[in-house]
């Protein structure tokens, strides 16, 4: 097995807990249309683009709307989301992330962000991590959201590396699938019951040794 030369990180739910804010904002929108969305259903929205998420939620609520109405709702959701994001500080970085990055840099690994969010740079700026990545691939640079592998393939390409050189850190089922389709090894952040396809699952980055991730084998 290749030793990894780069780690590719998802943003929402891996670096920072914005997954909760996405859920709150989508829930507010669903409630305004007269239905609710569960936390379990929310798992299927993680890593999925804004418009794809909206379509899944409307289907869940049995609501049919015009493209114009959908755009207005997506804009409204994003405004609610940004209200929540605007309160964020470096204190919102998830446990273990800062220490892990120190070790990653010390080990000489490259880092990339692989997020389908169009708000990724704004969030990185708010938490003071904009300069911590050698490459940033976000929702403004890709055409297809996860589970399409585009975001991670572009990350490897921008770093000048092959997929086999990369390990991806993801909290979303769609994100693990995207990384696997890109031919990359995966560390799931969350629970093994949900992230069944990840090569390794940890609750967060506390206590994960960089060397273990560098030498991570594909799950058999
Ligand atoms: C992903 C989130 O990172 O970004 C999804 O997991 C979200 O929940 C997607 O829908 C798009 O984000 P944004 O910020 O462009 O609406
Ligand atoms: Mg995520």
Image: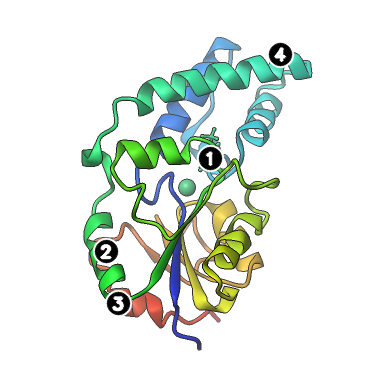
Q: What is the count of numbered marks?
A: 4
What is the crowding at mark 1: few (fewer than 14 residues within 10 Å), some, or many (at least 20)? Answer: many
Residue 17 visible in this rendered orientation of the protein = no
C-alpha separation, residue under disc 1 versus residue under disc 4: 21 Å
Residue drawn at 58 percent across, 19 percent down: 75
Q: Indicate whether 144 appears above or below 51.
A: below
Residue at 31% across, 57% down:
204
Q: Which mark is residue 200?
A: none
**Callout 4–callout 2 Cβ contact below 8 Å:** no
First of labels 1, 2 by sequence position: 2
Reading the image, the residue beneath label 3 is 107
Residue highlighted by disc 2: 100
Residue 205 spot, x, y in % from top left: 30, 60
- The residue at 52%/23% (across/down) is 78
Residues at marks 1 and 2, CA–CA distance in whole angstroms: 23 Å
Q: Residue at point 61% right, 22% down?
A: 74
> Disc 4 or 2, which lies upstream in sequence?
4
- Residue 209 position within the rendered picture, expressed as x and y whole percent measured from the top left: 27, 74
Q: Is residue 37 left or right of residue 200?
A: right
Crowding around mark 4 (Cα neighbors within 10 Å: few <14, some 14 to 19, many 20+) is few
Disc nearer the start of the sequence (4/3) = 4
Describe the element under mark 4 as helix, strand or loop.
helix
Distance from label 3 to label 1 (Cα)?
28 Å
**In screen coordinates, is 149 left or right of 114?**
right
Q: Secondary structure at mark 2?
A: helix
**Does label 2 point to a residue whose CB lies under 8 Å from ligand 2?**
no
Distance between the Cα atoms at labels 2 and 3?
Answer: 11 Å
- Residue indicated by mark 1: 117
């Amino acid at each position: 097995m290749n030793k990894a030369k780069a780690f590719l990180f998802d943003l929402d739910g891996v670096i920072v807990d914005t997954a909760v804010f996405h859920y709150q904002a989508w829930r507010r929108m669903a409630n305004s249309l007269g239905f609710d969305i569960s936390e379990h259903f929310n798992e299927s929205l993680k890593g999925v683009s804004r418009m794809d998420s909206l379509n899944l939620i409307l289907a869940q609520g049995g609501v049919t709307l015009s493209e114009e109405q959908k755009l207005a709702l997506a804009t409204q959701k994003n405004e609610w989301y940004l209200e929540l994001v605007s309160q964020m500080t470096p204190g919102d970085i998830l446990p273990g992330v800062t220490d892990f990055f120190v070790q990653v840099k010390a080990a000489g690994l490259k880092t990339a962000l692989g997020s389908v969010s169009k708000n990724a740079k704004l969030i990185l700026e708010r938490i003071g991590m904009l300069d911590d990545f050698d490459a940033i691939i976000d929702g403004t640079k890709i055409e297809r959201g996860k589970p399409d592998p585009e975001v991670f393939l572009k990350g490897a390409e921008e770093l000048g590396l092959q997929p086999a050189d990369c390990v991806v850190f993801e909290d979303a089922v769609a994100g693990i699938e995207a990384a696997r389709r890109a031919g990359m090894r995966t560390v799931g952040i969350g629970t093994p019951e949900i992230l069944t396809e990840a090569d390794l699952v940890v609750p967060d980055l506390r206590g994960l040794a960089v060397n273990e991730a560098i030498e991570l084998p594909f799950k058999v």
